[in-house]
Amino acid sequence: MSVFVLRRLLTLLATLVGASLIIFLVLDALPGNAAQMLMGADASPDAVRALTAKLGLDQPLAIRYLQWIKGLLIGDLGNSYVYGTPVAGLIAERLVLTIPLAIMSMAITVTLALSAGIYTAANHNKLGDVGVMSLTQVGIALPNFWFAILLVLLFAVRLQWLSAGGFAGWEDGVWPGVKSLLLPAVSLAVVQAAILARVTRSAVLEVLREDFVRTARAKGLGKREVLWSHVLRNAMIPVMTVMGLQFANLLAGTIVIENVFYLPGLGRLIFQSIANRDLIVVRNCVMLLATMVVIVNFVVDVLYALIDPRIKVHDL
Amino acid sequence: MAERSTMPLIEVDNLGVRLNTSRGPAQAVRGVSFSLKRGETLGLVGESGCGKSVTAMSLMGLLPDSARVTGSIRLDGNELAGLADADYCRLRGNRISMIFQEPMTALNPMHTIGNQVAEPLRRHKKYSAGQARQEAIALLDRVGLPDPARRIDAYPHQFSGGQRQRITIAMALACEPDLLIADEPTTALDVTIQGQILDLIADLVEERGMSMILISHDLGVIAENVQRMMVMYGGTVVESGPTDEVFRRMGHPYTQGLFRARPKLGARKGTRLKTISGTVPELADLPAGCTFSERCPLVIDACRAALPPMADVGPGHGVRCIRTDVSMAANVGALSA
């Protein structure tokens, strides 16, 4: 077990180093000089050159990369070109919104998907199965920003239960914050849940065809007991794999959804920083997203080994 | 309770099973009748797709939902056909148990073997976790798993095929069932292990006074392990009788063909195995009349007209053939081979 975790940790580190290189090089290759952007098109070349030197942008590529990595390790991400405030602080105040949003959205996804997937598999080819599967087909086809607008029309404009946008913050307690994140979380979750429900259904159906299910039935277990005690754990491996991948999609989705709902989250920060050529913010935000995705997938790998006793042996 | 000893344990009468296959509805089993007393052993022989496993699964009540069962299956006089699943669950693994063909896949890879063996005990006998664990160790010891107290928390992938089959046997025997159904229990195992497993099953059947239905395509396995046998083809029983009697005087051309087709030791190098010409018919399009008529060397027009009745050719020995006068004149059997 510990060897397994150690190996996965090394893979994780290597992935992060690779990701940081790609992020750094791609952003560096982008046209447009940050100093020029900041000072405007009619700034004098001397002033632009002075600002370039001040921002450290005249250093060689390798030095700048190493300085960035060193900053990441000690928690000093530098200052935003646009706001002039520390990037770490900017990100931290946005994460207060985006992390709860991601957790809520993932929780809704998993709840919807597992119940729909297990229900349809248990009622394979019956009316309920066909009905729910048709719904997931619709869910997959929905663009999440469009679905978000529909939700706003229904719950904010017509029913006036929830607000159409903005974030209430956590100062007045948990509920106002959760309430303002509800519609965005649902709009992010629906497409993901539709996909995950189909994955769950086919994984459960596949396990239901296994010989050991017949053995369990031959021991006198009812269909439902077999499903809960023998099938689900076996079906979780593909489901968790897809969940890990979906987490990345979800983070990408926040960029669009936070804009639809005017939420001051990480996604919106990235969007605005790209528009402002505030590349130092973009670079650190993207690195943070990459790290979150890699860590989630590391956790999924470790969960595999906890769920399936065979994995420790095979992967050593 | 006094009449229990004389009453058959299991009585199957005119069993028919209709399945939905990819090629449309098919009569997988028809007109199967037999009865089995306590302690008796019965063999079911035939090629794959002949209906022997479907017969077994209908006894277990584990056919697919779309299957239609006709006829009657009685356990101690109680009708099982059409029994609600919840009631059937009380019998399965308790009074009727089953051992399957593939020990590699018959165990849940995610559960320890101890939990899997203890599961029927906890369920049917309401044992506590501790009691069930002790009993599971005893059972695993009885089926010859080495060092069961230490290995009870191991997972199936840590055992060999033969050991896994011992584990499934321990599982099937946990609640001391009255009837054990063994569906090709040794087919997936190494030849050297096959004998050990069959001996183990035979010992346990003897020791616990169970009845057993042993399913196999291997005539040798049947010859050595059961008192009576039924040969199935195309969903019907084509020959049945006491094992010795059937092997001495094989009456059905199909039984004779199966017997000739088995490989023999001492045959000259290069000798081709005898085969039965043609292929097993799809259950969805069985021929009218005798199911074997299309492959039978003795076929006449009358064979194709209607399914032949069971003809008595000896004590308890029936053959579903109208040409036994010709087929049995050839006297194919263990004695002539």
Image (cartoon, helix red, strand yellow):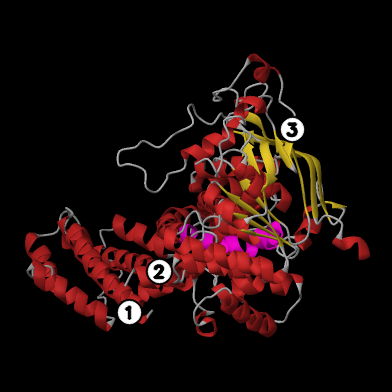
Position of A61 compared to A251: left or right? left
Q: Position of residue B190 (x, y in %)?
A: 42, 59
**Residue under label 1:** A3
Residue positioned 31% across, 69% down in the render: A83
On the image, numbered disc 3 is attached to which residue? B310
Badge 3 density bin: few <14, some 14–19, many ≥20, Cα 10 Å: some
Q: Is residue B158 above or below residue B235?
A: below
> Picture coordinates of residue B103 (x, y %)?
51, 61
Q: Position of residue A192 (x, y in %)?
A: 50, 53
Residue A147 circle label: none
Closer to the camera in the image, B284 or B315: B315
Q: Earlier in the sequence, mark 2 or mark 1?
A: 1
Question: What amino acid is at disc 1?
Answer: Val
> Which image quarter is the N terminus of chain B in?
bottom right
In whole angstroms, how far apart are the C-alphas of marks 3 and 1?
A: 66 Å
Closest to the observer: B84 or B197? B197
Q: Which of pointers 3 and 1 indicates the residue nearer the eye?
A: 3
Residue range highlighted in magenta: A217-240
Question: Which residue has dot 2 on it?
Answer: A311
Q: Secondary structure at mark 1?
A: helix
A134 in relation to A220, above or below: above
